[in-house]
Amino acid sequence: MSDKTGRLLLIAMVVAALILGGGCPRRAPGEEQPAAVTPVQGDTLVIGTVAPMLLNPILATDVPSTTITDLVFSGLVTVNDRLEFVPELAESWEVSPDGLVWTFHLRDGVTWHDGKPFTAEDVAFTLERIRDPHTITVRRGDYEQVDRWEVVDPHTFRVYFKEPFAPALQAFAMGIIPKHLLQGVDINTAPFNTRPVGTGRFRFREWKPDVHVILDRNEDYFKQVPHLNSIVFRIIPDDTVLMEELAGGGIDFSGITAPHYKRMAAVPHLNVHRFPSLRFQYIGWNERLPKFDDDRVRIALSLALDREAIAEAAYEGLAVPATGPFPLVSWAINPAIEPLAYDPERAKQLLADAGWKDTNGDGWVDRDGKPFEFEFLGRAGDPVSKMIIELAMEYYKAVGVKLNPLFLEWGDLVSRLDPPRRAFEAFYLGFSVGVDPDVHIFYHSTQAEWGFNDTNFQDAEVDRLIEEGRRTMDFAARKQVYHQLHQRLHDTQPVTFMFFIEAIVGVDKRFQGVTPSPIGTLWNVEHWWVPEAQQKHPAP
């Protein structure tokens, strides 16, 4: 294990200890307690972000969209800072002894943002829309083991599974959508997708494309009513401009990329938080194309990159080479697996074994008269992606592979990757696994057409292990399955696993109650508040 990997693993262990131990130090007997401070209402949180795509939780595929929908919509369950599933729209639930029947007891008195009552009919409708083949959603694979469901009464919903389904609670953290507004409507094109109505902490007010999305406090929220009046998501696609706005006070909250970390940490009005995340970065290869559908080629393309050097250059020590999709804070990670080492000579040999050789002496490997050349997509305005892709270009040139960069605005990039287009050769992105490590929608072969398996990876052993992990209810046995799955993914490289990264966020110091967690920073935003004397924005 490298020193850097060991450092991040130590951080992850500390975070785990805080989670399991309650997250704060214990006071000695008789030690004076701080004076209680009562939160007050008021002020607006201004967040810098790239543009969302749409605001429907069962259709959204990008982080900006899901960040907003997580505030507007509620699931049956949610996740706390201990990485535990806890009640949300469901007050409680029980599971039959055979693991096949899950019964959710829903809260009474919950209303949609338009005042209509929430009932079990809305939960049934949400499942119907996800399972409907007409719906363009990558989420369908999370519910394929559902056999049927039953609205027992307005506040009781029962689900019958075909076989025991260990990730069930993660599936039911999905935001529930309103039947009364979407029944009989084409959900893929509904105006609802840009003017959402949920049951969540904040209600939608306005979306001005390329300008902002505004949410207001939900005064009727069924749990802690937010203290903040509103949240404004300002659309700022360029990361350098984003950092200038954060430093200058034009926005209050933003993720911070590694090149800006030291400068932003010195800004007097900001609290800058670093913490392990559930996110990893990767290079995706379109395995519908013959040049990427060979394990040897993908392994070669991984071996050709000096990821230690790239991490140091692009992330300045705030990332380490990844071994697979399970982050350092996940119980599913197999600690015995080491990252693939930089080995350009072995990469050349594997390419040659797959038929890619420099037959004409021009420095580029070719097969059947065609050079190994591909278009590589990255997000415009992201200096880290730009640096990584430019460094990759040089590493691939050294093994005779030609990379052609193309930087796209966020919406254009996502639309190229999402179904049904899949209009790409390769790309650099990241994603977060859930608290439950089920990776079915990312790597199971059945998810290549409509799921998150946008690279079209297909491997029978990976399919088998994913399926076994989903139906194994015993934790210890399931952990062993995921250790095997981790090894198989490492050996086949469905994508080039690039980096585990630390999350870095900057928040204006006037906001109280901020508690970053591996699940994100906004997980408890309803508890954030600003002392009255420090409030900047009057009520709308």
Image (tube, helix red, strand yellow):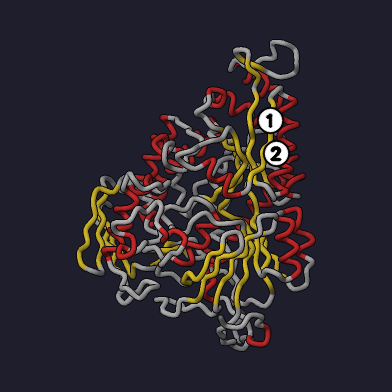
Is 62 placed left or right of 360 in the picture?
Answer: left
Q: Which residue is more in the foreground, 26 or 518?
A: 518
Q: Which residue is more in the foreground, 100 or 54?
A: 54
Q: Which image quarter is the N terminus in?
A: top right
Is 395 placed left or right of 457 in the picture?
Answer: right
Q: Which residue is more in the foreground, 435 or 412?
A: 412
Q: Position of residue 84 (x, y in %)?
A: 45, 62
Asked whether the residues under the numbered discs 1 and 2 touch, taking CB atoms below 8 Å apart as contact, a structural biologist would say yes
- Residue bearing mark 1: 403
Q: Quadrant of residue 518?
A: bottom right
Q: Is residue 117 above or below residue 437?
A: below
Disc ID at residue 327: none
- Residue bearing mark 2: 389
Is 137 placed left or right of 297 in the picture?
Answer: left
Mark toward the start of the polypeptide (1 vs 2): 2
What secondary structure is marked by label 2?
helix
Q: Which amino acid type corresponds to the residue marked 2 in the rendered image?
A: Ile
Q: Position of residue 197 (x, y in %)?
A: 41, 67
Q: Quadrant of residue 126?
A: bottom left
Residue 242 in view in this figure: yes
Q: Residue furthest left?
A: 152
Q: Is residue 360 above or below residue 59?
A: above
Within 10 Å of disc 1 (Cα), the crowding (few <14, some 14-19, many 20+) is many
Q: Which amino acid type corresponds to the residue marked 1 in the rendered image?
A: Leu
- Residue drawn at x 69%, y 50% is 381
Q: CA distance from mark 1 to mark 2?
A: 9 Å
Residue 97 in view in this figure: no
Q: Which image quarter is the C terminus in?
A: bottom right
